[in-house]
Image (cartoon, rainbow, N blue to C red):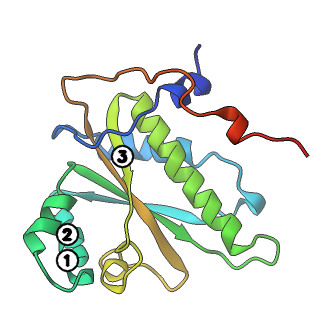
Amino acid sequence: MPGVRAAMLARRSSSKVTDAAPTPAEVADLVEAAGQLADHSGLRPWRVIEIRGEARDILGDALAAADGGRDAEKFRGKARRAPLVLAVVASFRPSHKVPRWEQEAVAAGVAHGLMLLLDDEGWGVIWRTGELTRTKPVRAAHRLGEHEELLGWLYVGGLPDRGKKERPKGRIRVAEHLSSL
């Protein structure tokens, strides 16, 4: 079963990863591929921010500030769970034809596509969000513009020795999610 279907059926989130990470050039290639999705009017209402090395502490400090300034080390540790963190941002464009919700859906599609691509390339990846995602300190740390919203972060690293296991078939009950009009 080659192709996209196989990649989607095999995909799994990896909450624990090693210190290996794709290079900036590899990330750029994958972002280019993920950006080739349905996009009404070709607005490209999204961007991705690479966060590596010490820059992850900026994220951790922003999360701590958003949580009331408590336990900065805890949040720095969370930001350092992976060697590469990719922040996915919806960058809304003025349009009378494409509503804001549709633009956010395009940005989410890029995030999901990027996740699939990273997983298919053998990287461990998980999409993280939470109640602090759209707070002022986190917005400021990511230097978001007035018409931007953070969708979350893709935490990326090498797969531990456990390797990539196939998901069991039939993970969802299709009848619960598919109907006819």
Using the image, determine if residue 45 lies above or below residue 32. below
Q: Specify the quadrant that holds the N terminus.
A: top right
Across and down, in percent, residue 25 comes to 35, 43
Across and down, in percent, residue 40 comes to 76, 59
Q: Which mark is residue 64?
A: 1
Kindly indicate the quadrant of the structure image that contains residue 69: bottom left
- Say few, some or many: other residues with alpha carbon within 10 Å of mark 1 (under 14 / 14 to 19 / 20 or more): many
Residue where numbered disc 2 is placed: 60
Across and down, in percent, residue 180 comes to 87, 41
Kindly indicate the quadrant of the structure image that contains residue 170: top right
Q: Earlier in the sequence, mark 3 or mark 2?
A: 2
Task: Report the number of numbered marks.
Answer: 3
The residue lying toward the viewer, choosing from 65 and 91, is: 65
Q: Are marks 1 and 2 in contact (CB under 8 Å)?
A: yes
Q: Residue at x 13, y 81 (%)?
A: 70
| Residue type (three-letter) at the residue carrying disc 1 | Ala
Secondary structure of the residue carrying tag 2 is helix
Residue where numbered disc 3 is placed: 126
Across and down, in percent, residue 71 comes to 10, 75
Horizontally, is 55 left or right of 95 in the view? left
Using the image, determine if residue 38 lies above or below residue 116. below
Secondary structure of the residue carrying tag 3 is strand
Q: Residue at x 54, y 68 (%)?
A: 90
Horizontally, is 171 left or right of 142 in the view? right
Q: Residue at x 41, y 37 (%)?
A: 118
Using the image, determine if residue 160 lies above or below residue 100. above
Q: Earlier in the sequence, mark 3 or mark 1?
A: 1
